[in-house]
C-alpha cells in the first residue's frame, strides 16, 4: 500500500493524512477536541501536520488532534478511502481494526453524540459519513471515535407497542 506500509505511525493518522492531502487547495472545516469549528484554507499536509491559513494568518494542526474534517465538496475524491488493512500488533490491532469493523456502508449511526449520520464509506482508519439531510461528506478518524450508536430499524414488536400507546 505504498506510504501506509512505510509509515512510522501504526495507527489511523496515516490514513487521515492521506485523506486530508486530497483536499489541498480547498477550504476545509476541521474539528478537534479543543475547537470543533476550525475553517482552514488547506495548503499542504506533511509529516502529520496540516498547514494552511485562517483569516490570512498561517496555521498548523497536528493530524493526531483532528477528530474529523469536511469540505463543501459534495462528492469525495476517488480513492479517498483506502482498503481496510488488518494489523496484528500495535494500536491498530487493538483499537482501530475492531472499531472499524463496527461501521458498515448504509448504517445510520451517531458518533460521539452526533445527530444521525449515514455511513458512506469505511476504510483504513477513517469512516466517511454525512448528515441525513446534507450532501456534505465528513471524514472521521476511527482513532478518535469515543462511542457510536447504530440506529436499528424498528421491529414489528416495537411498532405494535408504539401504536397501542
Image: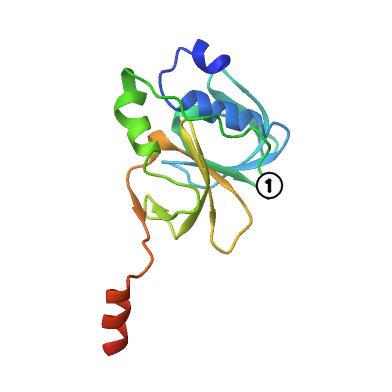
Q: Dot 1 corresponds to which residue?
A: 75
Q: Could you say which is closer to the camera, residue 74 or residue 78?
A: 78
Residue 58 visible in the snapshot: no
Quadrant of the drawing holding the C terminus: bottom left
Q: Could you say which is closer to the camera, residue 140 or residue 48?
A: 140
Q: Residue at x 51, y 10 (%)?
A: 6
The answer to whether residue 25 is left or right of residue 59 is right
Q: Residue at x 26, y 81 (%)?
A: 161
Q: Which percent across, then down, holds residue 119? A: 50, 50
Q: Residues within 10 Å of mark 1 (few under 14, many from 20)?
A: few
Farthest right residue in view: 25
The answer to whether residue 158 is left or right of residue 84 is left
Quadrant of the drawing holding the N terminus: top right
Q: Could you say which is closer to the camera, residue 88 or residue 140?
A: 88
> Residue 79 sits in which quadrant?
top right
Q: Which percent across, then down, holds residue 20? A: 60, 32
How many tags in the picture? 1
Q: Which percent across, then down, holds residue 14? A: 50, 23
Q: Residue at x 40, y 24 (%)?
A: 86
In this rendering, the answer to whether 128 lies above or below 135 is above
Residue 70 visible in the snapshot: yes
Q: Residue at x 36, y 43 (%)?
A: 102
Q: Which percent across, then down, holds residue 144? A: 39, 37
> Residue 90 sits in which quadrant?
top left
The answer to whether residue 35 is left or right of residue 153 is right
In this rendering, the answer to whether 82 lies above or below 160 is above
Farthest bottom residue in view: 164
Question: In terms of secondary structure, where does tag 1 sit?
Answer: loop
Farthest front residue in view: 156
In this rendering, the answer to whether 157 lies above or below 57 is below
Amino acid at each position: 500500500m505504498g506510504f501506509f506500509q512505510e509509515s512510522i505511525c501504526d495507527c489511523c493518522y496515516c490514513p487521515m493524512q492521506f485523506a486530508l492531502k486530497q483536499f489541498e487547495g480547498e477550504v476545509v472545516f476541521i474539528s478537534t477536541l479543543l475547537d470543533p469549528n476550525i475553517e482552514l484554507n488547506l495548503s499542504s499536509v506533511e509529516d502529520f501536520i496540516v498547514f494552511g491559513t485562517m483569516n490570512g494568518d498561517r496555521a498548523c494542526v497536528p493530524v493526531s488532534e483532528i477528530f474529523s474534517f469536511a469540505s463543501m465538496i459534495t462528492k469525495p475524491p476517488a480513492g479517498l478511502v483506502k482498503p481496510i488493512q488488518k494489523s496484528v500488533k500495535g494500536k491498530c490491532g487493538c483499537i482501530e481494526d475492531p472499531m472499524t469493523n463496527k461501521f458498515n456502508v448504509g448504517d445510520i449511526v451517531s458518533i460521539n453524540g452526533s445527530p444521525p449520520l449515514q455511513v458512506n464509506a469505511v476504510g483504513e482508519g477513517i469512516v466517511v459519513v454525512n448528515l441525513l439531510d446534507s450532501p456534505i461528506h465528513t471524514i472521521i478518524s476511527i482513532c478518535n471515535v469515543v462511542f457510536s450508536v447504530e440506529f436499528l430499524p424498528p421491529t414489528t414488536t416495537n411498532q405494535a407497542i408504539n401504536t397501542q400507546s
